[in-house]
């Protein structure tokens, strides 16, 4: 048995400076321009987490996606994509980074981010990253396969629970996996002050089989980024699989939004 | 395996409201246990928990894990620390450990939780997150911890100047054990719209060094439920280190943040306590007792009720022990190197159907412990001697309402005449290489020791199909399942040296390797598995993959750093140690070499553990080897060449014969090796002479016999195995030696030996010479004798002088040297039977 260990120091970018900021476009799911986080890297970096926050209260939840890219101005290449949800009560908490259980290699030179949200608001959003420097000193698995999200650049699916602690119906997240997929987490947001479980399943409609379960809850309001990371990424979605989700809850008929974050193999 | 899993994350309770963890009514005192998993269907690994609901403000809470049956839970001592700002606030209620806790919860162990916190009334509702049979290497065999311990988090203050470091706040003045730090628990100050960075530092006051940095940000208030920052992977900080934390933030305000260090606690193996001084020769009232570690609980027995205090080895031992079997330690066979299974058993009274109604239908793979001490020692609460321990291999419900448990040693537990043995290499070619050809599917991933080099290449490279790396498809050749010293020395195809590095060929240690491995690392990690691979394109690739022109490599294998940067290990005994620790008792995957497995001296909470493999014995044997050959024995081999796997016992046999050692279990139940040391002073040391008057029992009688099977005075031997699979024979080296005086005395008696771990003639000649001079001059005499319990003082494979009238010569033996090769304790009558080889004539 050999768990992952890492001797490398983790750093932040920007370092000892305010996050990079960008105003949302005001058009749902439309990318902002790329905004530089830092102009250079000393060596090739490995992205370990993305910290996204906005200092507003809203009446309608905002789903967001952030691309992290590398490259010169006008030639940025997307390295990876993360996703979160900003609750209706506003961002009222200390922000948990969106941690990547399989960090992304090849953050090389100028790096930037861009944002798209489900909202038509034009608030200013903040973004920073954490990273380690190549080479890895330890056993950390890294990849150049970006994280992907589903639904992509679109509203999350809405799951509805059955009666108390009875599962609702399955709702499709992906019609057909383009490759073998490795699930790293899910973005889940519950409508009620409740406890809930969300099954992720694969299989054709009406014959889905649960492959893992997320459990979460909301006391008053669950807030950004609402990202639930698996400690061990799940390698159980074969290419071509239909991926779906369902929920059950301590509150009968409660709803939850759901999106998933994953890698396509090979890693 | 790797960080990935195919197993589902599970919750308990499932599809039900979380269970309330009661409060003790006193701050930072654990409340009672609440059971979450009563009858697990597989081995449990702890992944985290959810907290909902509850009422609190600024709550710091430890959730502890207990295992065992309800009412007799044993704490893992694993407080999982969470900081919960405000129960009325917003935020995450799910806390996921970055590495699941695995390997600490026995199969079938029930799991409970309890909590302590800085409130005398908080009662959180909790659901446990866990895996069953997690098929991933990414699980940790250590408990969690937090500093400060059972106290509110430490204060870390910002400076009041934007992005200027505050002063260091001490989290722990000196770590008791090695710690794998995985992050910080944080109770933040109430801030809005602020970026924040925390440095973790090590070192003395005023000379702290930053070892890592974490970053987060604030929204419009800090009223969250669960606050933490996790690192990408645990960071090892060694015992004795002072750990502190400082912060800087975007706002020019002076704030106090509550910070706790969260980590996995990795205590160093502790040498088991030595037995009391009256063991074994002063034992006049022997007390045998046994313990079973079952589902995290300990149940223990003796022949009569032992009403020990609860602080003394688990307290009461029930009177169920009807019979403890003979406890037998036998060395590997000198001729073949084969090592038989070491076993022991206990028969327990079950007239009250205690085991027949036990919550577990079988105790298979639980662990059994066999102890011996004197009544005097027990009453004085001294330390018993651990006679044997091991996994339970069989546990029949035996006749007359009895129940029997049989334990095997750690190698033998996987061995059964009627099923597959563990095969080495354990790792096979599978999904790490998704485009592997059918012919390579399931082949073993080779393990290389020493330098394997032949004209035209000594190791045949295995075709594992194409991989797309950096957007380019390469034909990949597999050389080893670990990093190799310096990468790959050279490659040949069709007898020609390949030189077109960067166009046709890529190999670690050669030009343009960074096309394949941008970091320049000499290895390639795939799904958490480390490999030495080479890559081909163009005609080289075509001919390699169609089999028309195989590729052969010269390569140096394992080195101490596990990343290819160290010097190749050539010492044969050191290589055997690596095989034993990394590949036979465990299965190395990637990263640093594995620490050796350990076992607890007692299955309770005494915390004393010992390595399963006595690594020092290999060092000693290496030193002895230098008395046979200047510079010692050199090793070089490929295990799993061409993908061929062998049973673990075959590999042990090959190692023992090639290394000229015997192996066994020592008095501490550790696997060890011993090479015959021809210097009398070293061989005997200070061991006192056994005499027929004082030590050796009349019955069973002292007996001498010969072992003709070991005798040979004309020894042919082969070495330097051919790993090319080219039809030119299995061996590249051979020689023979004879013992002339013996041939005159007994005629020519021929035997043949094989040394799969040796490639050089000098070592092969030295090993063969050692074996010829051991059993070649005369047929060896085997001596058997019996002693009282005092015989336990003479360990397996130790040397002992014996004086006995029944020995050879006109007056019998006087301090005649004997090498002990088996030791058998019979608890029914308190005798110890010993077997040894008469080596007097071989010493100088």
Image: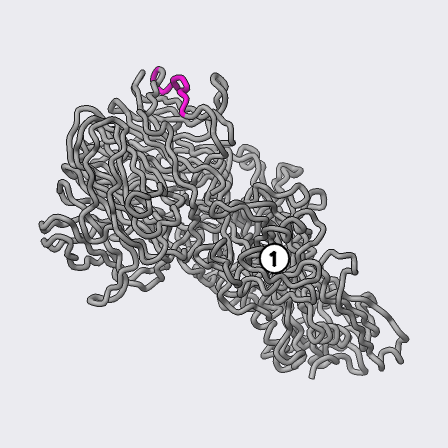
Residue A50 in percent (x, y) is at: 29, 43
Name the image colouring: one colour
Residue wearing tag 1: B447
In this view of the protein, which residue sits in the foreground, B80 or A203?
A203
Q: Is residue A139 left or right of residue A158?
A: right
Instruction: Give the chain of mark 1.
Output: B
Residue A112, percent from left and from top:
28, 45
Q: Quadrant of the C terminus of chain B?
A: bottom right
Residue at 70 percent of width and 81 percent of height: B843
Helix, strand or loop status at disc 1: strand
Is residue A129 found left or right of B140 in the rendered image? Answer: left
Residue B56 visible, this orientation: no
Q: Quadrant of residue A231?
A: top left
At label 1, counting other C-alpha atoms closer than 10 Å, the crowd grade (few under 14, some 14-19, many 20 or more) is many
**Residue visible at 25% across and 30% down in the picture:** A117
| Of residues B232 and B629, the one drawn nearer to the viewer in this rendering | B232
Taking B121 as reference, is B270 left or right? Answer: right
B241 versus B645 height, above or below: below
Per the image, is B252 magenta? no
Quarter holding residue B557: bottom right
In this view, the residue farthest toward the front is A74
**Residue A252 occupies quadrant:** top left
Taking depth in this image into account, of B266 and B833 the one nearest to the observer is: B266
Q: Can residue A99 be seen by looking at this rendering?
A: yes
Q: Position of residue B472 (x, y in %)?
A: 51, 46
Above or below, B549 against B118 in this view is below
The picture places residue B643, in percent across and down from the top left corner, at 66, 51
Stretch in magenta: A163-173
Q: Is residue A168 magenta?
A: yes
Q: How would you classify the magenta stretch by its main secondary structure?
A: loop
């Amino acid at each position: 048995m050999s768990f992952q260990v890492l001797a490398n120091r983790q750093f932040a970018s920007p370092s000892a400076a305010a996050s990079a900021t960008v105003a949302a476009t005001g058009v749902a799911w439309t990318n902002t321009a790329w905004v530089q986080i830092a102009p250079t890297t000393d060596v090739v970096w490995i992205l370990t987490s993305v910290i996204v926050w906005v200092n507003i209260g809203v009446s309608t939840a905002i789903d967001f996606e952030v691309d992290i890219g590398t490259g010169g101005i006008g030639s940025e290449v997307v390295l990876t994509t993360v996703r979160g949800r900003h609750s209706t009560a506003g961002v009222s908490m200390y922000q948990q980074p969106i941690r990547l259980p399989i960090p992304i290699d090849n953050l090389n030179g100028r790096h930037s981010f861009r944002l798209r949200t489900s909202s038509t608001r034009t608030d200013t959003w903040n973004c920073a990253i954490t990273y380690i420097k190549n080479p890895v000193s330890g056993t950390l698995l890294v990849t150049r396969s970006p994280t992907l999200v589903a639904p992509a650049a679109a509203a999350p699916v809405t799951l509805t629970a059955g009666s108390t602690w009875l599962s609702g119906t399955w709702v499709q997240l992906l019609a057909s996996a383009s490759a073998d997929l490795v699930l790293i987490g899910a973005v889940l947001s519950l409508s009620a002050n409740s406890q809930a479980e969300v099954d992720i399943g694969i299989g054709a409609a009406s014959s889905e089989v649960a492959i893992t379960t997320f459990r979460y809850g909301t006391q008053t309001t669950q807030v950004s980024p609402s990202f639930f990371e698996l400690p061990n990424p799940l390698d159980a979605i074969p290419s071509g699989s239909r991926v779906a989700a369902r929920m059950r809850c301590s509150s009968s008929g409660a709803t939850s939004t759901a999106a998933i974050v994953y890698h396509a193999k090979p890693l | 395996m790797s960080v990935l899993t195919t197993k589902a994350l599970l919750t308990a309770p499932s599809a039900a409201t979380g269970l309330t963890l009661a409060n003790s009514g006193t701050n930072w005192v654990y409340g009672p246990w609440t059971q979450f998993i009563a009858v697990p269907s597989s081995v449990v690994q702890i992944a985290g928990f959810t907290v909902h609901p509850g009422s609190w403000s600024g709550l710091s809470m430890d959730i502890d894990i207990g295992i065992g049956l309800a009412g007799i839970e044993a704490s893992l001592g694993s407080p999982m620390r969470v900081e919960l700002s405000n129960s009325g606030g917003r935020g995450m209620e799910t806390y996921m450990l970055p590495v699941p806790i695995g390997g600490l919860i026995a199969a079938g162990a029930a799991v409970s939780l309890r909590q302590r916190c800085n409130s005398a009334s908080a009662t959180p509702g909790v659901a446990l997150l866990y895996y069953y049979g997690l098929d991933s290497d990414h699980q940790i065999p250590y408990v969690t911890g937090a500093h400060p311990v059972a106290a509110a988090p430490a204060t870390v203050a910002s400076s009041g100047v934007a992005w200027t470091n505050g002063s260091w706040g001490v989290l722990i003045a000196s770590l008791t054990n090695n710690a794998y730090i995985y992050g910080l628990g944080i109770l933040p100050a109430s801030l809005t719209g602020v970026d924040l960075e925390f440095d973790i530092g090590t070192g003395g006051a005023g000379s702290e060094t930053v070892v890592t940095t974490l970053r987060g940000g604030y929204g419009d208030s800090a009223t969250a439920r669960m606050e933490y920052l996790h690192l990408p992977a645990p960071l090892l900080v060694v015992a004795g280190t002072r750990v502190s934390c400082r912060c800087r933030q975007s706002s020019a305000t002076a704030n106090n943040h509550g910070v706790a260090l969260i980590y996995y606690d990795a205590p160093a193996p502790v040498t088991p306590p030595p037995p009391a001084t009256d063991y074994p020769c002063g034992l006049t009232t022997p007390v045998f007792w046994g313990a079973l570690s079952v589902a995290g609980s300990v149940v223990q027995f003796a022949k009569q009720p032992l009403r020990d205090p609860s602080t003394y080895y688990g307290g009461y031992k029930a009177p169920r022990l009807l019979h403890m079997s003979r406890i037998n330690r036998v060395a590997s066979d000198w001729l073949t190197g084969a090592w038989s299974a070491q076993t022991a058993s206990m028969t327990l009274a079950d007239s009250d159907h205690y085991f027949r109604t036990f919550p577990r239908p079988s105790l298979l793979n639980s662990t059994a412990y066999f102890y011996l001490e004197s009544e005097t020692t027990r009453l004085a609460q001294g330390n018993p001697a651990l006679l044997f321990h091991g996994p339970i291999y069989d546990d029949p419900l035996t006749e007359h309402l009895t129940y029997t448990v049989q334990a095997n040693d750690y190698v033998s537990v996987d061995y059964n005449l009627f099923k597959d043995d563990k095969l080495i290499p354990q790792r096979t070619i599978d999904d790490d290489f998704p485009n592997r050809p059918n012919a390579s599917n399931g082949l073993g991933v080779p393990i290389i020791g020493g330098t394997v080099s032949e004209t035209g290449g000594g190791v045949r490279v295995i075709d594992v199909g194409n991989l797309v790396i950096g957007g380019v498809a390469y034909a990949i050749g597999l050389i080893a399942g670990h990093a190799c010293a310096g990468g790959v020395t050279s490659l040949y195809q069709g007898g020609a040296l390949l030189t077109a590095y960067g166009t046709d060929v890529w190999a670690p240690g050669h030009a343009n390797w960074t096309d394949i491995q941008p970091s320049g690392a000499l290895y390639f990690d795939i799904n958490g598995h480390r490999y030495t691979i080479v890559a081909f394109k163009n005609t080289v690739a075509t001919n390699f993959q169609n089999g028309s022109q195989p590729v052969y490599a010269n390569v140096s294998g394992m080195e101490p750093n596990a990343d290819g940067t160290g010097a190749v290990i050539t010492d044969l005994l050191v290589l055997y140690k690596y095989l034993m620790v990394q590949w036979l008792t465990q299965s190395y995957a990637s990263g640093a070499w594995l620490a050796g497995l350990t076992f607890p001296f007692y299955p309770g909470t005494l915390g004393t553990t010992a390595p399963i493999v006595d690594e020092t014995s290999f060092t000693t044997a290496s030193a002895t080897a230098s008395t046979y050959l200047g510079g010692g024995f050199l090793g070089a081999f490929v295990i799993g060449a061409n993908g061929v796997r062998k049973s673990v016992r075959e590999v042990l046999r090959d190692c023992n014969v090639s290394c000229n050692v015997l192996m066994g279990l020592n008095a501490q139940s550790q696997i060890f090796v011993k090479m015959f040391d021809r210097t009398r002073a070293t061989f005997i040391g200070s061991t006192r002479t056994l005499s027929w008057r004082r030590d050796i029992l009349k019955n069973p009688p002292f007996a001498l016999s010969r072992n003709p099977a070991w005798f040979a005075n004309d020894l042919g031997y082969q070495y330097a195995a051919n790993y090319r699979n080219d039809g030119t024979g299995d061996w590249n080296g051979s020689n023979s030696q004879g013992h002339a005086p013996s041939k005159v005395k007994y005629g020519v008696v021929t035997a043949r030996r094989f040394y799969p771990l040796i490639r050089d003639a000098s070592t092969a000649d030295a090993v063969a010479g050692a074996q010829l001079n051991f059993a070649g001059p005369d047929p060896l005499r085997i001596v058997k004798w019996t002693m009282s319990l005092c015989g336990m003082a003479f360990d397996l494979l130790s040397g002992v002088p014996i004086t006995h009238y029944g020995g050879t010569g006109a007056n019998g033996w006087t301090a005649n040297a004997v090498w002990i090769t088996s030791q058998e304790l019979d608890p029914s009558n308190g005798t110890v039977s010993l077997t040894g080889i008469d080596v007097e004539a071989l010493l100088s």
